[in-house]
């Protein structure tokens, strides 16, 4: 029997098309690297406690961080304020069932939803829909809003036209102060402000503008553009002092996740993620949220086919999933729709109207099982069969409830992913009973082997895995 060998943890999401290559994936687990350390630790997601059940879907939550500011939400068609217990006090209605875009100036909060622009006057509490410009012209359907230098900028469905508002007054839309994209006119999907500059995201171009200071028309297009176009408005998120979004190549086609580097777009998704994206029947319905915990900033992209998350701290991807799924099945997509930072914690809204708060004090997702899963790369001996005598996991775990033990489950995956063993479970002990090493033995012989380790009822802190192997004859 060979000496114990460390099985490497491969944190980056990569599902190879080639037999015998890596099927590595983290699900609801992110990679953490301590300063000065070369190896990664696999850390599980926080659990969630239910703050309140709202009407479905939860379309947006917004925290007004000014002194005395409130927490606002749109649940179903209801817009209102939330108290600390998540109770919604209705202030009005917002048409549609799409996700909300928000902006706030010194006195007002603007909401874009269902193609409409709504404005709440905070001092008076007056909430109304804006349907016309300052000269009385009908305002086209509004698709997106951003604010720069106290001026609101509106993207509309009127081809590639956008409008801007008076200073600190979202209600006054200058009908003679609108503009069109200039390099390659295309329909606008969204407007965002990045480092103080408005950027316009069209279906074929990304065009940054700058405030040039003229009295009547203060914005001028920078003489740069990119060959990527935006696919889905709700994936375009300000992230880590930049912007990330789901994009397509304006000429060659193909979907990718890109991130702005200066004024150019850089592809950050790998082939595995792009294969997932190309399975989507409706990529335009994809959405993304950004959130942060323990110094890790995350961009979670949610599609009909699955959810993947990019970690700015490590520049690696992992998967995010909701609920339970059978061993070896593809994890179902996240149900998150929106996020807000409230009283020092992440609050999430989801498709079912649940408003939850992330915390490491619980190990489920507001009553739903939270599964955390790691799949290792394949181990082998260059075509020779390898006998695997045992697998050991070193863990640091916050264990189960006083009456229900947390569980860890292992499966062996061999022959290039074609053979998967039955799940073998171990209890991690009741609350207050610590178990830091778990061992499985008699794992058989194969040309290659990967191992799927799954934890529920506890937060995963997987330090390393060991296998005891012995190379044998040619297979």
Image (cartoon, rainbow, N blue to C red):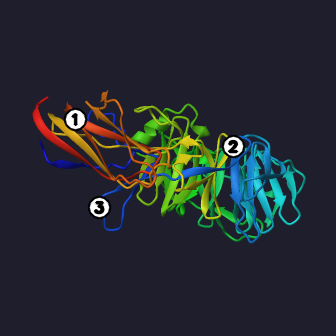
Q: Residue, x 83% and y 58% (percent of image)?
A: 120
Q: Name the residue under label 1.
A: 442
| 432 displayed left or right of 172 | left
Q: Is residue 89 above or below residue 272?
A: below
Label 2 sits on a secondary structure element that is loop
> Residue 466: x, y in percent?
24, 48
For disc 2, the neighbor class at 10 Å (few under 14, some 14 to 19, many from 20) is: many
Q: Residue, x 29% and y 43% (percent of image)?
A: 377
Label 3 sits on a secondary structure element that is loop
Q: Mark 2 points at which residue?
A: 353
Tag of residue 38: 3
The answer to whether any part of residue 172 appears in the image is no
Tag of residue 411: none
> Residue 116: x, y in percent?
79, 47
Q: How far apart are marks 3 and 1 (CA)?
A: 31 Å
User: Between tags 3 and 2, which lies in front?
Assistant: 2
Q: Distance between the residues labelled 3 and 2?
A: 42 Å
Which of the image's four quarters has the N terminus? top left
């Amino acid at each position: 029997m060979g000496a114990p060998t460390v099985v490497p943890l491969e944190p980056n999401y990569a599902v190879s098309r080639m037999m015998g290559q890596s099927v590595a994936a983290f699900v609801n687990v992110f990679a953490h690297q301590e300063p000065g350390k070369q190896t990664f630790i696999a850390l599980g997601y926080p659990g969630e406690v239910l703050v309140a059940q709202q009407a479905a879907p939860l379309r947006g939550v917004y925290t007004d961080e000014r002194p005395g500011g409130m927490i606002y939400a749109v649940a179903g068609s209801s817009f209102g304020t939330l108290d600390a217990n998540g109770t919604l006090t209705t202030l009005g209605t917002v048409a549609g069932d799409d996700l909300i875009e928000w902006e706030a100036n010194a006195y007002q909060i603007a909401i874009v939803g269902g193609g409409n622009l709504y404005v709440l006057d905070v001092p008076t509490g007056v909430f109304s829909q804006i349907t016309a410009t300052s000269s009385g012209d009908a305002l086209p359907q509004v698709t997106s809003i951003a604010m720069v230098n106290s001026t609101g900028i509106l993207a509309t469905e009127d081809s590639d036209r956008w409008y801007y508002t008076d200073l600190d007054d979202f209600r006054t839309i200058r009908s003679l102060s609108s503009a069109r994209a200039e390099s390659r006119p295309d329909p606008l999907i969204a407007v965002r402000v990045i480092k103080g500059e408005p950027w316009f995201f069209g279906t074929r171009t990304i065009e940054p503008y700058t405030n040039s200071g003229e009295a009547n028309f203060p914005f001028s297009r920078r003489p740069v553009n990119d060959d990527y176009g935006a696919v889905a408005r709700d994936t375009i998120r300000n992230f880590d002092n930049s912007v990330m979004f789901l994009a397509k190549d304006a000429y060659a086609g193909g979907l990718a996740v890109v991130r702005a580097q200066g004024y150019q777009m850089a592809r950050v998704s790998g082939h595995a993620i792009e294969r997932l994206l190309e399975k989507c029947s409706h990529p335009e319905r994809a959405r993304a949220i950004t959130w942060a915990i323990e110094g890790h900033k995350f961009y979670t992209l949610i599609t009909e086919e699955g959810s993947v998350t990019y970690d700015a701290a490590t520049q690696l991807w992992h998967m995010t999933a909701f609920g339970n799924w059978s061993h070896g099945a593809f994890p179902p997509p996240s149900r998150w729709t929106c996020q807000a930072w409230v009283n020092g914690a992440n609050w999430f809204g989801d498709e079912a109207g649940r408003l939850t708060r992330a915390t490491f004090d619980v190990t489920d997702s507001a009553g739903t099982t939270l599964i955390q899963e790691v799949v290792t790369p394949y181990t082998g001996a260059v075509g020779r069969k390898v006998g695997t005598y045992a697998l050991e996991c070193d863990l640091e775990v916050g264990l189960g409830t006083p009456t229900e033990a947390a569980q860890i489950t292992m499966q062996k995956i061999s022959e290039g992913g074609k053979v998967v063993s039955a799940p073998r479970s171990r209890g991690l002990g009741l609350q207050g009973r610590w178990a830091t090493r778990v061992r499985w033995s008699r794992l058989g012989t194969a040309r290659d082997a990967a191992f799927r380790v799954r934890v529920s009822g506890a937060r995963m802190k997987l330090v390393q895995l060991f296998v005891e192997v012995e190379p044998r004859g040619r297979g």
